[in-house]
Amino acid sequence: MKKILVILGSTSTGKTDLALRLAKKLNGELVACDSRQVYKKLDIGTGKRPGENGELRIENGKWSFDDIPIHMYDVADPKKQYTVFDYVKDANKAIEGIYKRGKLPVIVGGTGLYLKALLEGLPNLGVPIDPKLRQQLNNLTIKQLQKRLQEILPDKWEDMNYSDRQNPRRLVRAIEIALTPEESLRATVRGGFKNVLKIGLMAPREVLYKRIDNRVVSRINQGMIEEAVKLHDQGLSFERMRQLGLEYGVLADYLEGKITDKEELIRVLQGKIHGYARRQITWFEKEKNVFWIDITQNNWYHDTYDTEN
């Protein structure tokens, strides 16, 4: 039976570094599971570069680290929306290629929805985008979108958490699915992976927040602001940056003067990413059959790395 290894957890827990080391030991290749690392040129803000010391190569959009390929980086234009459906389709192709080469797929990332869709499939995943409807809905305010969804699908509204109710993209997608005629639905893309080992990395909140804070400063020093300036100069609108979320949304505010200095920028970024980490933790708490590891415990990496079965 085909095997698959998954390294999951919240941001700043060192998932990619562990995944790379295990891939070297187990003859594997990485498959990133991140909703923003799929986009080209969103490199520093999304943390594509591993923290490990080694040789990073980027050739024709293909990433590798110490000769370990990293798939699902740079597969989409940041000016265009890339959906969960797109991710599952493309990631499945990458995984099949890894199997054909006799290697082990190592899935790594923190986008829980993408991971769930890849491993298990999701209802309505195949519902196509309706450009005309989206154009209409994108002109509505958050409150108008909320009211629209409550009117046409109150059960869905009740099932949504607070974060999703405040997210215009989630609201638009929910309305789009609700209004799609049954006969127009495409088949759901379903996961076909049975022999899956999930390793989850976690840390106490105070430790996690400190790692996040340090990482924000590090990425600012690496040129994250300059990266955002370059993206905008190349035609990525501030509106689209905000749609991409987190770092790029905050950087759009900074570049437009809504955030006045670098110190405030750092504070806002740190706070936003703290919140994102909390949402990731809440999501992954529901994930089943995960071997959880506290990265603050002594020998945590040694015990994981030396596991043979």
Image: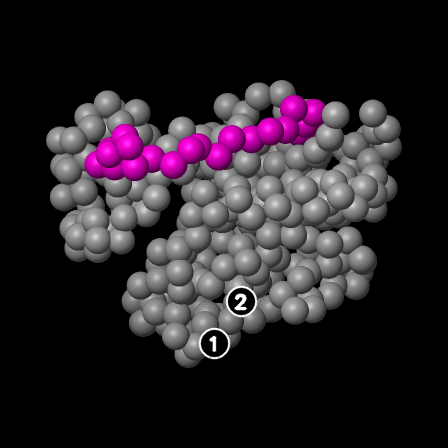
- The one nearer the camera, 278 or 23, is 23
Q: Is residue 254 at least partly visible in the picture?
A: no
Task: Report whether 164 appears left or right of 103.
Answer: left
Q: Which secondary structure lies at badge 1?
A: helix
Residue labelled with disc 1: 230
Label 2 environment density (alpha carbons within 10 Å; few <14, some 14–19, many ≥20):
some
Residue 190, image x and y in percent? 51, 31
Q: Which secondary structure lies at badge 2?
A: loop
The residue depicted at 44 percent of the width and 32 percent of the height is 188
Residue 138, image x and y in percent? 22, 53
Give the residue type that dot 1 points to.
Answer: Lys
Task: Report whether 117 appears left or right of 238.
Answer: right
- Give the vertical position of 237 relative to 133 (above or below): below
Residue 30, image x and y in percent? 70, 47
Residue labelled with disc 2: 41
Give the residue type that dot 2 points to.
Answer: Lys
Q: Is 256 part of what is drawn in magenta?
A: no
Task: Report whether 38 appears left or right of 188.
Answer: right
Per the model, the C-alpha gap separating discs 1 and 2 is 9 Å
The residue depicted at 73 percent of the width and 59 percent of the height is 64
